[in-house]
Image (spheres, rainbow, N blue to C red):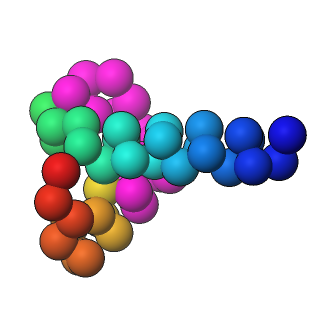
């Protein structure tokens, strides 16, 4: 069960990293966690 939850959380992080900045602003403008995901994905130059 723990592996499944980790996989689901990793998938959600990957999806938010791949989401356009405009869509993030529209859907979750004040979400600090998603802002951090976007920041880290840009810093490590994650190619999506």
Q: Quadrant of residue 5?
A: top right
Q: Nearer the viewer, residue 11 or 24?
A: 11
Q: Is residue 47 left or right of residue 29?
A: left
Q: Is residue 32 left or right of residue 9?
A: left
Q: Is residue 10 left or right of residue 48?
A: right
Q: Residue at x 31, y 49 (%)?
A: 17
Q: Residue at x 16, y 37 (%)?
A: 20
Q: Is residue 31 left or right of residue 20?
A: right
Percent position of residue 47, x then y = 15, 60
Provide the residue span drawn in magenta: 23-37
Q: Nearer the viewer, residue 38 or 4?
A: 4
Percent position of residue 21, x then y = 17, 41
In the image as oriented, which residue stretches furthest toward the bottom? Answer: 44
- Magenta stretch prevailing secondary structure: helix
Decide if residue 25 is in sight here: no
In the image as oriented, which residue stretches furthest toward the top? Answer: 27
Q: Residue at x 22, y 65 (%)?
A: 46
Decide if residue 7 is in sight here: yes
Relative to 3, residue 43 above or below: below
- Numbered label tally: 0
Q: Nearer the viewer, residue 42 or 22?
A: 42
Percent position of residue 37, x then y = 39, 57
């Amino acid at each position: 069960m723990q592996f499944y939850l980790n996989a689901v959380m990793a998938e959600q992080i990957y999806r938010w990293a791949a989401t356009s900045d405009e869509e993030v602003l529209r859907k979750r403008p004040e979400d600090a966690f998603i802002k951090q995901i976007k920041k880290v994905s840009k810093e490590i130059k994650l190619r999506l």
